[in-house]
Image (tube, rainbow, N blue to C red):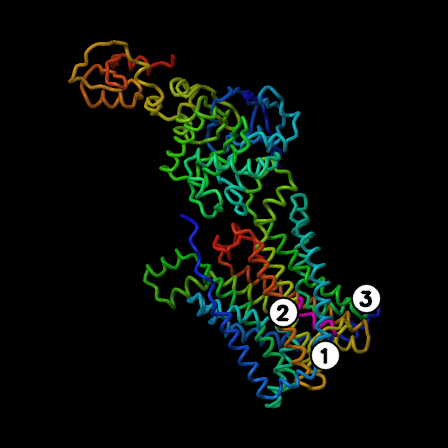
């Protein structure tokens, strides 16, 4: 069990101009195996909050519970060895090979050389990097995308239940970023780590998160599932942060199967069809391209399973009911 | 202390020797700049030449200064200039070469290639490019090289006292042969102060000549 | 894609040096100077040993202390004092070695001890500076990543900061040691012995052969020491942080 709970977490810095509240009484819970994205503009306190979880920053007050245990009680250095940590600049140590980098925490925990190397090979394979080619390379010999993957592998090396990621894909170009986000989701599906992920990109958050926490000036403005956040922003700030195209953003989160009315029988050959597993972006595109009032939904074999009507779509997008 | 009294009583001599010292260093560094900067610019155009020149220069630096004097004396004796001023200046000039050449070379190489392309693209000739873009940016690093050269030369000239060139080193050489602590300390202090003052003065010059836009970094 | 292979190290510099050395050797032999020099063979051997002792003792102590002090100054809690300390180091570095030896003599008299102490100070300072600056130049986000992963302070120093600073530190040690060998002749002046005896006496007596008998071995020693430390730098610094090794 590696659920994370933050209780009234606060960080105050004393400056010559008075106290600055970087993080103010933030409370939230992240379920085991879930991805929570901390989202907000620069300087809103999201990174500081993240760094209080692995105690790189000491909280001024408040508590952090991981798997039910108060992290206050643990030695910070020992604590960090049980938490994976990925930063934006990647931070691979240039003096060590890929194997050396991935093996840092396992070696600290006393793993044998063979076990460490095997683990490195396993992780590289999981991240679609041929182990033979990469394991003895140095970070200077890797491209940006490869380095980022090794950074993730390094964080996962000792199989920690929790992963903290601070804008980990920020340094990549948009194409690479898309690819690595998809890979990350696939990996998360298999590994089910509890992840806290800092981002300033609403699209990234919507794509990856099970829950999103929006920050402004140290305060938590709203904490909700992506669809709920987009459908019902709590205030002006959140609404403008998620963007005026928030309804469009919701399209990728909902599948055709979620809004169709079940039906079966013969398929009208001329009617536009959409697979039930596709998301509403495809549904919306078809509605825009054709004048029809409804679309037929089919399953993988092409058999009719239901109909999606414009009305049903509007009803679904006009609310946040699941 | 006795030394203090000694210093006070001998200020004119100290001043005279200091001037001798500075004249040797000044001439040596001056000539070294005139020969070194163009050399540095020239080798910046070819990696292979640069490697050779810099390597040979660093070998020259490993020759003990007293040995270099020793080699120059018989050669210069042939024209009756064996002892004193000339071998000291020539040796000092040789030691000043490498820091200046190397820093000029490095400074020019480190000019952002984008700037070079922009200058060429704007239609500047090589001479204009060097004069208006590359040298002004390279200047602080070149001055840093001159600084290193001056400090080295102050040390080399101190040893030149042993071949009759005068300068502040004479206090030390006499102090040793006469076991006179006062002269030893005077010489050491004078040399130290001269070197530190020169270093700081040139650091000030270096900072002053750094184009405002480049001034953010702390220099060495 | 990073990781471009560097061109093979050019042999030109070494070839040119070799040619010049041969030319000089020929000049020496044909002018009869060579046989003059060889007259001092026994002295050369004896004094070289003395010279090496001076260099080895002052050098190894300088490396040990220089590294230690440099690391100490680079620690975060020393940040306030480090700037001032480095300023002081810079100032003392500027003082000519002859001056430093003179001060040593006024404090410790003549003999090997003041000579070694004086050389130790002269060699120590560049090492302190390079160690300090090399460690400070390690990117902060590497240290942050290391902390975040659960490395303790000492482990961060040993596994991240030092390896990444090693190239610069080595460069400093190499330069300092070459300078040490080259300025050790002055140690003779305050009774420290070494090849300086042949050089200074040769000048005094206007015996070029004697002077060269001291000067040539000194220069050769300096080149050898620089070469050895250069090799150490090449082989001991990990490939990932060693620009000389195609990384």
Q: SS of the residue at dot 2? A: helix
Assess whether mark 2 and mark 3 are in contact (beta carbons under 8 angstroms).
Answer: no
* Mark earlier in primary sequence (2, 1): 1
For residue A139, side relative to residue C104 (left or right): left
The residue where tag 1 is placed is C42
Residue A289 sits inside the magenta stretch: no
Which chain hosts label 1? C
Could you tell me which quadrant the N terminus of chain A lies in? top right
Q: SS of the residue at dot 1? A: helix
Q: Is residue B172 above or below residue A4?
A: below
Residue drawn at x 50%, y 27% as measured from the top left: A196
Residue drawn at x 66%, y 30% as measured from the top left: A75
The residue where tag 2 is placed is C222
Corner quadrant of residue B113: bottom left
* Mark earlier in primary sequence (3, 2): 3
Residue drawn at x 59%, y 26% as measured from the top left: A10
* Distance (Cα) linking label 3 and label 2: 27 Å
Q: SS of the residue at dot 3? A: helix
The residue where tag 3 is placed is C108
How packed mark 3 is, by other alpha carbons closer than 10 Å (few <14, some 14-19, many 20 or more), is some
């Amino acid at each position: 069990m590696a659920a994370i709970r933050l209780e009234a977490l606060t960080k105050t810095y004393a400056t010559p101009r008075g106290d600055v509240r970087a993080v103010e009484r933030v409370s939230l819970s992240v379920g085991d195996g879930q991805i929570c994205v901390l989202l907000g503009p620069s300087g809103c306190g999201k990174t500081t909050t993240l760094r209080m979880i692995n105690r790189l920053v000491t909280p001024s007050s408040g508590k952090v519970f991981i798997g039910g245990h108060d992290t206050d009680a643990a030695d910070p250095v020992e604590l960090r060895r049980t938490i994976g940590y990925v930063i934006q600049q990647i931070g691979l140590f240039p003096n060590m090979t890929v194997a050396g980098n991935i093996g840092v925490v396992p070696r600290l925990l006393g793993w044998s050389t063979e076990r460490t190397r095997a683990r490195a090979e396993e992780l590289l394979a999981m991240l679609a990097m041929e182990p033979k080619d990469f394991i003895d390379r140095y970070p200077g010999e890797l491209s940006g995308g490869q380095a980022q993957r090794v950074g993730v592998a390094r964080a996962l090396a000792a199989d920690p239940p929790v992963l903290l990621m601070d804008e980990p894909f920020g340094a990549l170009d948009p194409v690479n970023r898309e690819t690595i986000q998809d890979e990350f989701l696939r990996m998360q599906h298999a590994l089910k780590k509890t992840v806290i992920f800092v981002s300033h990109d609403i699209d990234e958050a919507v794509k990856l998160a099970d829950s999103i926490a929006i920050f402004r000036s140290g305060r938590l403005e709203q904490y909700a599932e992506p669809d709920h956040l987009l459908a019902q922003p709590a205030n002006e700030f959140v609404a403008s942060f998620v963007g005026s195209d928030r309804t469009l953003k919701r399209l990728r989160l909902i599948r055709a199967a979620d809004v169709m009315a079940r039906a079966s029988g013969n398929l009208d050959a001329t009617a536009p069809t959409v697979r039930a597993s596709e998301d509403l972006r495809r549904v919306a595109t078809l509605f825009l391209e054709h004048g029809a009032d409804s679309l037929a939904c089919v399953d993988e074999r092409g058999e009719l399973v239901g109909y999606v009507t414009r009305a049903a779509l509007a009803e679904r997008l006009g609310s946040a009911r699941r | 202390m006795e030394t203090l009294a000694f210093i006070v009583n001998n200020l004119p001599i100290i001043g005279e020797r200091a001037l001798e010292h500075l004249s040797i260093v000044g001439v040596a560094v001056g000539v070294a700049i005139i020969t070194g900067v163009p050399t540095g610019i020239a080798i910046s155009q070819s990696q292979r030449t640069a490697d050779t020149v810099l390597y040979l220069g660093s070998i020259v630096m490993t020759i003990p200064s007293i040995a270099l004097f020793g080699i120059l004396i018989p050669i210069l004796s042939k024209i009756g200039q064996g002892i004193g001023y000339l071998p000291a200046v020539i040796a000092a000039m040789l030691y000043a070469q490498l820091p200046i050449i190397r820093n000029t070379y490095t400074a020019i190489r480190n000019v952002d290639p984008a700037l070079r392309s922009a200058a060429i693209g704007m239609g500047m000739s090589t001479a204009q490019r060097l004069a208006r873009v590359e040298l002004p940016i390279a200047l602080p690093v070149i001055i840093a090289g001159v600084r290193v050269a001056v400090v080295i030369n102050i040390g080399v000239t101190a040893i030149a006292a042993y071949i009759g060139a005068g300068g502040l080193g004479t206090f030390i050489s006499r102090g040793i042969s006469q076991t006179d602590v006062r002269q030893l300390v005077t010489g050491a202090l004078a040399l130290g102060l001269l070197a530190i003052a020169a270093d700081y003065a040139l650091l000030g010059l270096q900072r002053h000549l750094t184009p405002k836009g480049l001034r953010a970094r702390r220099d060495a | 894609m990073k990781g471009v292979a560097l061109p093979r190290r050019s042999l030109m510099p070494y070839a040119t040096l070799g040619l010049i050395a041969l030319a000089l050797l020929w000049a020496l032999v044909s002018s009869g100077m060579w046989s003059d020099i060889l007259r001092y063979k026994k002295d050369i051997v004896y004094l070289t040993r003395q010279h090496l002792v001076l260099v080895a003792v002052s050098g190894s102590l300088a490396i040990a202390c220089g590294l230690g002090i440099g690391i100490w100054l680079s620690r975060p809690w020393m940040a306030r004092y480090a700037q001032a300390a480095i300023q002081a180091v810079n100032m003392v570095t500027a003082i000519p070695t002859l001056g430093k030896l003179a001060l040593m003599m006024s404090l410790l008299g003549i003999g090997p001890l003041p000579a070694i102490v004086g050389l130790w100070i002269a060699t120590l300072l560049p090492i302190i500076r390079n160690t300090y600056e090399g460690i400070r130049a390690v990117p902060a986000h590497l240290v942050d990543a290391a902390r975040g992963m659960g490395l303790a302070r000492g482990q961060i120093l040993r596994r991240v900061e030092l390896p990444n600073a090693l190239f610069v530190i080595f460069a400093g040690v190499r330069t300092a040691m070459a300078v040490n060998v080259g300025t050790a002749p002055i140690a003779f002046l305050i009774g420290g012995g070494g090849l300086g005896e042949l050089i200074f006496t040769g000048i005094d007596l206007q015996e070029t052969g004697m002077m060269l008998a001291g000067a040539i071995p000194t220069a050769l020693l300096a080149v050898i020491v620089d070469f050895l430390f250069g090799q150490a730098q090449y082989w001991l610094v990990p490939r990932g942080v060693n620009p000389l090794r195609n990384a």
